[in-house]
Amino acid sequence: MSKIQLKKDTTFIEEFLTNLDNEGPFSSWELFQMNYQAEATSMTPTFNGLRALDYLPHVDFLPHQIQTAKQAVEEMNGRAILADEVGLGKTIEAGLILKEYMIRGLVKKALILVPASLVSQWAKELNEKFYIPAIPYRKSYNWEQVDILISSIDTAKRSPHREQILDINYDFILIDEAHKLKNHKTKNYEFVRALKKKYCLLLTATPVQNRLIEIFNLVSILKPGHLGNYETFLEQYGKDRKNIKQDAYLKQLVQKVMIRNTRKGTELSNTSRNIETVWLDFTEEEKAFYQELDQLTGTFATFTKITLLREICSSREACFLSLKKMADNENANSEIFRSLMSKIEELPNHSKAEKVVEIIQRNSDEKVIIFTEYRATQLYLQWYLQQNNITSVPFRGGFKSGKKDWMKQLFKNHAQVLIATEAGGEGINLQFCNHLINYDLPWNPMRIEQRIGRIHRYGQEKDVHIYNMAIRETVEEHIMNLLYEKIKLFEQVIGNLDMILAELNITDIETELQTIFSESTSTGEAKIKLDNLSSIIKYTHDSTVSEEKQYGN
Amino acid sequence: MAIEHLHDFLQNYFTAHNCELVHNQDGILTVQLTEKMDRALMNRPFYWHYVKSTGFAGEPMKLTLITNPDRRDDKGEWIHFGSPRLQQLFAHLHDNEKFTKLFQKIDTTKKTALYPWLVINIKISYIGKQKRDEIISIGLHLVNGMMKTEMMEYLKTIPLQMTISDYCFTISPLIKVKSGFKRIEAVLENYIENQTYEWADESLKTLNEEIDLLKHFYSDRMDEENLDNKMEQELNEITNRYQPHVLFNVINGGIFYLTDDPTLTIQ
């Protein structure tokens, strides 16, 4: 008994004695009994199990989400790395865990640190789905006042917030996109280590990239010493992540603090992805213009040239705007630009837009989302769809969160099509839509993954249809054939790409591609280089997929 | 004694607060709130402030609650065990229904003595790695010191009211309420001491394991500043998280005047 502290209730009897002295007020038998019943209903009768499920009858949890929450609470005692693949519902798992602790009365004060662009989405999800009164941080708030605050880590780590936050004893800390904390020398890492916390969840889709020490750093936030100390860890495992598969003991240790669900292992794989490449040809007029553009810009920097060619494959407007900008800035070639501009003006509608209308009309009962890289194309498509009696709403990353929600609602309830630019890709969930058109293909395949992740994620009940538009005999054909089809990007690599690129030490594939084009003297040379790049990605993918299975669980 | 039928519970709750049930069918309940309940539940202090300052009576709202999940898309609020509305009603009960003094209702023409009982409903929480609650309802006869558990179950079976029935009289307590409460606490302490502590042992084991890991973690890092502070903080975190403890929390309590009943035997 001595090892267990007993905290008695000292206030009740004092209040009761005063109440008796004052002759009341007394409760009626009905209400007295009801208070007792209410307590008997809300108490937690067993150490194990998830009480939260009884409290959330309106949410359909997937089995792996419930399992993850149970494991994090019962086996990991509330300190865990949640490392599911993108789209399997890490937010849901985290919400369920937080709810469980709140119901059990173990968490009152919580701090949720997420990327700035996701703050309001987290707030919405926690409030609506979990009835957790989480509030986004505003300037007028004091960190002490609000029990459950959501903020970006950048705001939180800045003075004077930093000092206030570090003074607070948090019951629960959650960090989204925790792979950004992999380096222990950064300010962010140091800040997170310094937080006073009881329970702690780190969310990331890519827990291990190329250096094993990164996982050591993440684990040290949760459970310092679990993987030994810094020196011995380096000595034993070095910096190479390949060691993780060689060392069963290390793998086991990591599994004690990390849960990773993959698409393959969960029910989500039931809804499949149908991918269709839609090839089309330019009209004669367009073809003529494309060739002229190709020839006239022959003397320009390869990158400028490629940009213009990609733009004309998207819309006349996108290309026109770039030409205009160049004509205004560059005196030397302004004549060429102006002549090109006047030729663009003579072109009829864009072939690709016509094709898109065809696809949308074929699926006239379905919601469709179109992604384009260019704002000019977005505006043009909006106008063009309207001409064809198709309702659409625009979506951009720059919209304020209120406007984003509004557009999403409009799309859900009133419009058939949502036209999004690249920056709109992150942070909206559109599971009610299962048709996606990649109007132009980004160079960075990671973006494709994010785009698809908007609709093919937890909550999607139908098969997902993806249409990739590409125009024959243009730069799009190269990108499509060499980069996307060769590595079977859509079928296989998605989900692993992050890891593959890290393995190859490619931090930004977009820069990599730009370099290829700008350093190549001819299209032929660029083709060969592209081909090499996709070969190496494919090779790395094949050899890492088997390894992936070796860690996490 | 957990709530079995939420709909009945809500009906009783609003009836006990003198709210009229306007509509009550197929799992949908509409009640006309009183001013008091409107103020307690509807969260519109500015309205009431405004109305009162202009000298009008004000108009309490109607509240529609849906307990039938099949009808949850109807107009009204779907209420279930996790919904904020029910949590609000629970909190309202928790804050307001702590104390009582009640008399057994008897239909008699003979002089009848009523004996005072102190009834305490208490929630015991066992907190180690995880947490578990237990609710105990215990009664103490304030004249002869007899104790009974599951007191609420017994009280459910007899009629109770807030005033004393005709021809009845109360016996004065020999045990003071405060020392009665202490006796109950002592019994509960004894009850806890006689339990097994697997949960606490497990928690202590984890506590010690993690402290060892932590010490090892810091064993080679003498280069960093404030190292002792950081380690101290992390030691505290581990202790807060795993130190086993037991919490007493009184839900409510009261004095009950009851007739002499031979079935109330010593526990």
Image (cartoon, coloured by chain):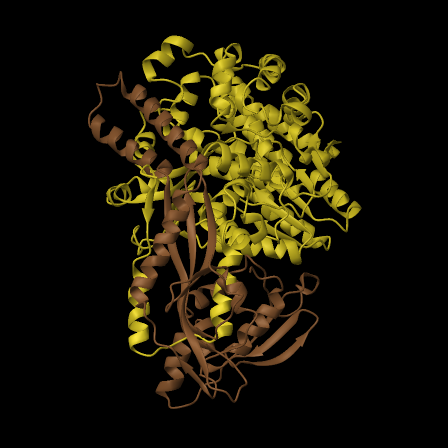
Residue in front for this viewpoint, B248 or B87: B248
Residue in front for this viewpoint, A466 or A296: A466
Q: Is residue B71 above or below residue A428?
A: below
The answer to which image quadrant residue A152 occupies is top left
State which quarter of the image contains the N terminus of chain A. top left
Residue in front for this viewpoint, A323 or A163: A163
Figure label count: 0
Which chain gets the yellow colouring? A
* Residue A342 percent across, percent down from the top left: 59, 40
* Residue B113 percent across, percent down from the top left: 44, 79
Asked whether residue B106 appears in the rendered view, the answer is yes
Q: Is residue A473 above or below residue A267?
A: above
- Residue at image position (45%, 11%) is A240
Asked whether residue A398 appears in the rendered view, the answer is no
- Residue at image position (40%, 18%) is A213
- Residue at image position (27%, 18%) is B219
Q: Is residue A352 above or below residue A550?
A: below
State which quarter of the image contains the C terminus of chain A. top right
- In the rendered view, does A450 fall on the left or right side of B24? left
Residue in front for this viewpoint, B83 or A479: B83
- In the rendered view, does B112 fall on the left or right side of B66? left
Which chain gets the brown colouring? B
Q: Is residue A251 above or below residue A3?
A: above
- Residue at image position (33%, 79%) is A23
- In the rendered view, does B235 fall on the left or right side of A429? left
* Residue A300 percent across, percent down from the top left: 51, 23
- In the rendered view, does A108 fall on the left or right side of B231? right
* Residue A389 percent across, percent down from the top left: 73, 55
The answer to which image quadrant residue B178 occupies is bottom left
